[in-house]
Image: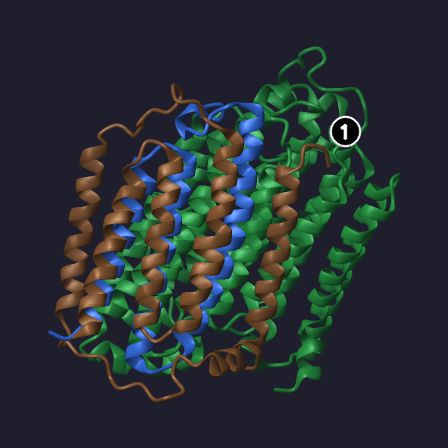
Amino acid sequence: MLETILFYLFAATSVTTALLVISRVNPLMSALWLVVCLASSAGLFALLSAPFLAIIQILVYAGAVMVLFLFVIMLIDISKEALKPRVVRFAKVVAVSITGYFTVIVCIVLWRPSFLPAPLADAAYGDVKVLGKMLLTDYAVPFELASLLLLAAMIGAVVMGKKKL
Amino acid sequence: MTITLQHYLFLSLVMFTIGMVGVVVRRNALIIFMSIELMLNAVNIAFLAFSRWSGLMEGQVAVFFVLAVAAAEAGVGLGIIVALYRNKPTVYVDDLRLLRG
Amino acid sequence: MNWFQFLGLTLPWLIVLGASLTVLFLGTLMKRGAHAVSMAISLLSLVAALFLSWQHWVADVTVSMGMMSFGRMTFLGWMVIAIASIFTVLLSHDYLARRKLGHPEYYSLILLSTVGMASLIAGSHLMLIFLGIEVMSIAVYALAGFLRHRLSGNEAALKYFLTGAFASAFLLLGIAFIFGTTKTMDLTVLAEQLPTVLSGDMASWFLFGVAMVLIGFAFKIAAVPFHAWAPDAYDGAPTPITQFMATAVKAAAFFALLRVASPLVVAVGPGWAKTLWLLSAATMIIGNLAALMQDNLKRMLAYSSIAHAGYALVAFPTLSTQTPELVHGVIFYLIAYTFMTAGSFAIVAFAQGQGESADVSHVAGLAKRHPWMAASFTIFLLSLTGFPPTLGFFGKYFLFSGAIKNGSIGLVVLALLSSAVSAYYYLRPIVVMYFHESREGVLERTSPATSLVAVVTIAFLAILYFGIFPSDLLAIVQRSGM
């Protein structure tokens, strides 16, 4: 019962804040709502027995990445006058058609198999130990590649951001 | 009422769609980028739900990588936005119309 | 897993990775000459990678380990991207030196990007393929905006980045649904499970996943209607990087698509064949029609690259594990395309000189001043059009004859018609080169840099040699298996 209540609480928060993220004129407000959205998603992660990822989500995503966002928004400091609720032409039509399209897909996708409650997970499921072991054994090659990804991103960010190379 | 896999998938697809609408409709590069982060977050929920229902940890590993990718993209993407802002103080993609034709 | 064997097999790219780090460190230690040294190191490492990949190809090892499957096809893909990156590095030196932008970070990013491509080509696990795509793309996002002081460079990088990240989200959603329905992300296991999944009640979820993965890839290879970013990104990026995006990135994406498509799309059925049919037809028609209206050579080549992706897609609707001739047709075409596009961009980089971009009028009078350059450009353009006996002709021939054998006659007719249209915009620069007087100061009197001449010569010789003896290249491709 508690799980059901928590799910609806987190889901409602995530969706509401996601809508706020895409509808604010000021990117600063969007970024703050995105933090709330990511934090409530972290709650969902915890409900899905992924406590480690929930913590990572808050530490890295809602913490570090969003702080980076806020830094950049503050750095470029767009003046109040320059902020306009600018959208593409026929924005409503586009939004409605995308939503309609996705509704159809959601119906097709979700209706087929029978609705199943979560199977009982064994004790090891979601354990950090298991996750860590997988990352460094089966997934060793992708793990190394992820480190290259971060290196490439680091060089890229320096190249882009530094005033004088 | 118990929560089923479909509940999570529905939530994930709704958030994905919200992100997609944000990317297509908004013209502010920062908000477009945040909408992409929303889409990635939606994918994470789907991965974890599938992972939980199949009892395989692979989905959790995938989420770990998605978080790494999102962080890397944030670094480069914000760098590009800062570099752009140095040359022209705007974050609106429709102010950029040098490359046309 | 035998780590020694794994390291031995991936050695070509470990060398490239080592070179990338070396270049990065050298940049901090050396003040003068860092540019030339970093270019030389990058070049050497890529040549070593090419040579070692060739050695692997000759040794013909077929093994799967560490989420990668090695085989002749993998090694062939590695050779293609190594060659394309060698061209990029050669073109870059002169281009950057003229603009006083010779920073080692540039070469480091190119090398990292090729390592990403190599794992993308070898990957047999969806997560590894995804990470490979990301390493490749993130490096190229930064490279596309390397002319940071120019608004056009920033614009190109921003547009490329936003669409690329958007596409990644689709790709990931697709991977999530494929994982959810098949309980695996390994392509070999996945292929075995396909019949059970498709007859089960989760089939619609699986199809949704495949569709999303397809959309993600369509963005990466710039297939219509997911192509809008390509002309802008190609135009604003530094010319060597445009060449890199058009050849190496595209070839790597196609190699990965072939690997992903053969288990996924193919087994799924006729509905997908129709979607791919439409994708291919729209891509070549719109690419060619839009290219007709371009005066800017880089934009023209960008649309031409979209059109060529459309031709390569001709093979996909009827692709399956029983049709090796289609796979070989696509690979042969990619190799041919790599040579002729790399050569064309070398000429564009030359005609551009110090300028920001190159119009068709920039090559006016090239025939008088640099007859060899003009002759090579003519060959490249004729090859892109598909005139016999150039490599481009045989590329189209093998690709289309394979497609006809498998029954996509309508699509091949469309492809032939649209490549007839393409003759108009490919021939225009030739006419301008030979018959128009050059405008004063547009074409510098300076002779082209040695490295640029090297690119043009290699591409020219490859097109001519394989144009006269296409069976040599075809034999290499055919002996690579599937």
Query: Which quadrant would the N terminus of chain C be assigned to in this image?
Result: bottom right
Residue A47 position (above or below residue C425): below
Left or right: residue C354 versus residue A150 is: right
Q: Quadrant of residue C451?
A: top right
Q: Residue at x 71, y 24 (%)?
A: C354
Give the camera-side residue of C11 and A85: A85
Q: Quadrant of residue C151?
A: top right
Check the image and name the residue furthest to the front. A2
Q: Colour of chain B?
A: blue
Q: In what element is the residue under mark 1?
A: helix
Left or right: residue C112 versus residue C309 is: right
Q: Residue at x 46, y 64 (%)?
A: A56
Colour scheme employed for the rendering of this structure? by chain
Q: Quadrant of residue C174?
A: bottom left
- On the image, numbered disc 1 is attached to which residue? C98
Report x, y in % for residue C329.
49, 61
Residue C154 position (above or below residue C457): above
Q: Residue at x 38, y 83 (%)?
A: A125
Asked if residue C417 can be seen in this view, the reply is no
Q: Colour of chain C?
A: green
Report x, y in % for residue B1.
10, 74
Give the camera-side residue of B24 and C125: B24
Crowding at mark 1 (Cα within 10 Å: few <14, some 14-19, many 20+): few
* Chain letter for the residue marked with disc 1 in the picture: C
Left or right: residue C147 versus residue C152 is: right
Chain the render paints brown: A
Report x, y in % for residue C52.
74, 69
Left or right: residue A13 versus residue C462 is: left
Report x, y in % for residue C44.
80, 56
